[in-house]
Amino acid sequence: MHTHTDGDPIDNHTCHCSVCKRVTGQDTTHVVFFRYGDVGVDNEASLKRQPFNDQNPNGPLELCTCAECGAPIMLDDKQHRIRVIVPNLMGYDGKSMPATYHAFYDPSTGEAKPNDGRPVYEGLRPDFEWPKPA
């Protein structure tokens, strides 16, 4: 099972949200958004789909895994706006698409605010615009 892209990422960030923490088991997650139509999947029928956020099963994102081995492949947007890659979990070189900011940082968690020089936001970067559905 492989994905491939014909386009550049539209967003690269380090995510601090509770959903990413729960799903990945990581303190932060490097997340890369692509336009929906820019990411293709070999044998898409072989994907197992499950809600990305088990606490919001009707939310827009689905976690797609290989139906045979269970490996994570991508996050798929049911609204066909984006497809999402988590480089360190999905076999991509994260250094080739570095995170440019911190997203969904919540100071009420008590975690120290990131101080690596990248901007820190309580959501996606303010100038991010969701693509129109493919």
Image: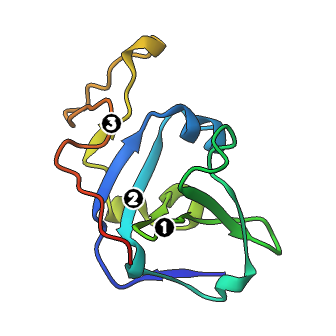
Helix, strand, or loop for circle 1?
loop
Query: Is the residue under label 1 in contact with that under label 2 (CB below 8 Å)?
Result: yes
Single out the mark in the foreground, 3 or 1: 3
Q: Could you say which is closer to the camera, residue 10 or residue 49? A: 49
Residue 30 marker: none
Residue 11 spot, x, y in % from top left: 30, 57
Q: Could you say which is closer to the camera, residue 96 or residue 1? A: 1
Q: Could you say which is closer to the camera, residue 37 or residue 66? A: 37
How many residues crowd around disc 1 within 10 Å: few (fewer than 14), some, or many (20 or more)? few
Above/below status of 11 relative to 34: above
Quadrant hosting residue 43: bottom right
- The residue that label 3 is drawn on is 123
Q: Which of marks 2 and 3 is nearer the N terminus?
A: 2
Residue 92 marker: 1
Give the position of the N terminus as an image quadrant.
bottom right
- The residue that label 2 is drawn on is 32
Query: Is the residue under label 1 in contact with that under label 3 (CB below 8 Å)?
Result: no
Residue 96 spot, x, y in % from top left: 33, 65
* Amino acid type, residue under disc 1 in the picture: Tyr
Helix, strand, or loop for circle 3?
loop
Question: Which residue does the image show at 25% across and 48% down from the upper left?
Answer: 100
Question: Which residue does the image show at 38% across and 61% down from the upper left?
Answer: 33
Q: Relative to 68, is 43 on the left or the right?
A: left
Q: Earlier in the sequence, mark 3 or mark 1?
A: 1
